Amino acid sequence: FDRPLLFNDSSVIEVRAECNKNTEVYLTIDGERSVKIEADDKITIKRADITAKLMRTHRHSFYKTLSEKMRG
């Protein structure tokens, strides 16, 4: 996929690689290190039990700042 996918925070998503035993499959999340998965592995994606606090450091949005920088 080349676009983000959004799901409800209560969603639980299961992913399986359908491939033959001679195919190598790797999982990469958020551009981090790839992990090799086997044909019978199941990947479960769900909301984490921990939270992250975010803060805004500028009054402008990221996209507005990016647009201003692109204009020069």
Image: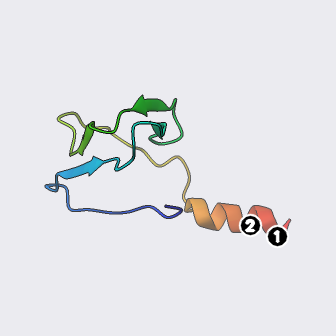
Image position of 40 (left or right of 49): right
Q: Position of residue 19 (x, y in %)?
A: 39, 47
What secondary structure is marked by label 2?
helix
Q: Position of residue 55 (x, y in %)?
A: 42, 44
**Amino acid bearing label 2:** Glu
Q: Position of residue 13 (x, y in %)?
A: 22, 53
Q: Nearer the viewer, residue 42 or 1?
A: 42
What secondary structure is marked by label 1?
helix
Residue visible at 20% across and 62% down in the picture: 8
Residue visible at 35% across and 47% down in the picture: 17
Residue visible at 45% across and 29% down in the picture: 35
Residue furthest toward the right?
72
Up-down relation of residue 25 to residue 61 (above or below): above
Q: Position of residue 37 (x, y in %)?
A: 38, 33
Question: How packed is label 2: few (under 14 Cα within 10 Å), some, or many (20 or more)?
Answer: few
According to the picture, the residue beneath numbered tag 1 turns out to be: 71
Q: Which image quadrant is residue 69 in?
A: bottom right
According to the picture, the residue beneath numbered tag 2 turns out to be: 68
Q: Which image quadrant is residue 29 in?
A: top left
Specify the quadrant that holds the C terminus.
bottom right
Residue visible at 66% across and 61% down in the picture: 65
Image position of 39 (left or right of 69): left
**Amino acid bearing label 1:** Arg
Number of numbered tags placed on the structure image: 2
